Amino acid sequence: MTDPGSCELCRLPGGEILWQDGLCRVVRVAGREALDHPGLCRVIWNAHVREMTDLRCDERRHLMALVFATETALRRLYQADKINLASLGNLVPHLHWHVIPRYADDRHFPAPIWAEPRRASAPARAVAASAALHGAISEALAEEQGGA
């Protein structure tokens, strides 16, 4: 088990915080990944746990509702060709989900974003403002929790 004191997702936000509550947060990823994949977000469980099954059923539902709300928000704002969802945690064994807008002309498509690039950088894409992403996530989460 990784010591929470050495876990980067325990010590650092993991990106620009777009939305958070007492259990988890949604962050926009920065750096090269963000340049290649605008809108790339992570949904991070705040407490240091490794696996989905470390959570109670109600906590799992809450986390997945937030993953789905983040996907919905990104679909609305980015009109991507595909949204990838991934929960790997091999390098950072702290429960988190990647929510990744994908385009047929992105550097890695159709391979995962962690694969060797297949082409030069894609054309620059507009990046939604943090306030727009926060609002879209909040709206989609309300819909998800309300069953709309």
Image (spheres, grey):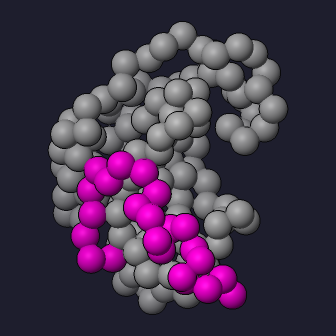
Q: Is residue 16 magenta?
A: yes
Which quadrant: the N terminus?
bottom right
Residue at point 54%, 82% (across, down): 5
Q: Is residue 12 left or right of residue 100?
A: left
Q: Residue at x 61, y 86 (%)?
A: 3
Asked whether the viewer can see residue 10, the reply is yes
Query: Which residue is rendered at x = 57% and y = 74% of the image?
Result: 7
The x, y position of residue 129, in whole percent, is: 25, 32
All told, the count of numbered labels is 0
Q: Position of residue 25 (x, y in %)?
A: 35, 63
Q: Can residue 53 be seen from the camera position used here? A: no
In the picture provided, is 119 more to the left or to the right than 140?
Answer: right
Quarter of the picture holding the C terminus: bottom left
Query: Which of the pair 8/29 is nearer the observer?
Result: 8
Question: Does residue 78 appear left or right of residue 30 in this picture?
Answer: left
Which quadrant of the figure has residue 49? bottom right
Nearer to me, 45 or 83: 45
- Estimate the x, y position of residue 73 in percent, counting from the top left: 32, 41
Tell me: residue 119, above or below residue 22. above
Q: Residue furthest top?
A: 123
**Residue span colored magenta:** 1-23
- In this rendering, the answer to whether 105 lies above or below 31 is above
Left or right: where 129 falls relative to 88: left
Q: Give me the residue at 18% from left, 44% from top.
A: 135
**Whole-percent x, y for residue 101 in the image:** 50, 34
Viewer-side residue, 91 vs 110: 91
Residue 93 belongs to magenta span: no
Q: Is residue 10 above or below residue 37?
A: below
